[in-house]
Image (spheres, helix red, strand yellow):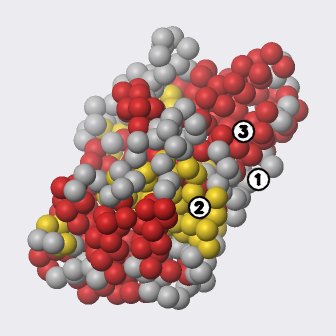
Amino acid sequence: MTLRCAAGVLLALTMVSGATAASQKTAITDFGATKFYAQSDEAALLAGVQLFVSAGLDRQDPAHDGVAALAAETILRTPVDGQTLRDCVSARGGSVTYNLGPQDVRFYLEAAPDTIASLATLVAKAIATPDTCAVTVNAARAAVLARIADDERNPVSVGLTMLRRSYYDGSAGMATYGTAGTVASLTGTDVAAFIAAHYRRGNAIVSGVGRVTENVATAARTLASALPEGSEVPVVSKAHPFAASPKRIVAQRDIGVTYAVLGFAAPSAGDKDFGAMLVIRSLLAGSFDRASATSLPTYSRAVGVVYNYDTRPASLSVYINGALLSPATGFASLDTVLRTISDKPMPAAILRRYKTSAHGEWETESVSLEDRAWSIGNFVELGSGPDYAQTALEAVDATTPASLQRVAKQYLQRFTLALIRPRDAP
């Protein structure tokens, strides 16, 4: 999920109207093997199209950890009209990016509605005929290695990766960009083989948001047609059950203080308990940032909550920022909060407050065009439907003191603890 600061939210609000994914209905166009899901907003200045390809982390094997990221980066660096695809699109007033998840890789194109169709032709060309020669792959490798290094310097990112590896069975638990060792050993042949095997039209989804015109629909069709025909059997991710005694995993990094991240199982999007867990997420986050006059960016909080609902099974992570709060104090405070909501029903007035907070957090997760496009495709991919964003808010409203207590008892009693410590710590 994209994490943004307040300035980013304000910028996004100038690009799209006040409507969000949770307040709009989705129009569906059948392209044959692929469907196009569009939420149009006539007040928006730009349009965005996102292509979901079933070539995410769960399609990798351990020997090729990182090939999904390297393949996507190679496509963005494929020469088109004498420039890399990314630079070519940028020079024509648009932007193209990619993001990786456990189940997919997502290419997102954003531009003015009257130019997006022509830009989609460039993106489709690179997807259909990626340049896997040594020069392009080496440049892509350098970019992926830089992302790996950035993640390794972020203790929260390190902790979340540790928990994912511990929780998921198989490739879905791999680090987003792989490991430096495996990425360094991958070749253009590996990239070409991965794309040929997994970039298929039959598993793809295309979403469109913003000012959706006929040009935007044409852009979506162009991106879908760039993929060869065929489909693959979906990968079913499995998770390891949590033991009665908490499991502890430890890593050392070049940081100044210890960070702690706790991982819990959580209901997936579409589950009957999803709304209650959204309320719990808001409650946990709000319990530790009351002294702040503004909503802090997620990684700037003393205690932060990350709900990973982009796959099945889902998980919830709570991290303690050792620079702002000692882990021991954080554990004690978190334990108090969890016991409070598990031991007895929450008073109705307090529950209403956190329902309102959950509404706000859910809405702001889909403010930008890119996040709205992701939301549509993600929920379709999970089988919840393109308009699940509104259904989730209804589930929040339906949460009762009893259901909140039941969900807290069911999911928040067992956990895994990841500790990220300074290298010279005893």
Residue depicted at 16% across the width and 82% down the height: 133
Q: Nearer the viewer, mark 3 or mark 2?
A: 2
Q: Position of residue 266 (x, y in %)?
A: 68, 49
Q: Nearer the viewer, mark 1 or mark 3?
A: 3
Is tag 3's residue or tag 2's residue first in the polypeptide sequence? 2
Residue depicted at 60% across the width and 44% down the height: 21
- Quick one: which residue is furthest to the right in this view? 402
User: Judging from the image, what secondary structure is the residue with disc 3 in?
Assistant: helix
Query: What is the crowding at mark 2: few (fewer than 14 residues within 10 Å), some, or many (at least 20)?
Result: many
Q: Are marks 2 and 1 in contact (CB under 8 Å)?
A: no
Residue depicted at 15% across the width and 72% down the height: 81
Q: Is residue 178 above or below residue 24?
A: below
Q: Is residue 196 left or right of residue 41?
A: left
Mark 2, residue position: 37
Q: Are marks 3 and 2 in contact (CB under 8 Å)?
A: no
In this view, the residue in front, 200 or 421, is 200
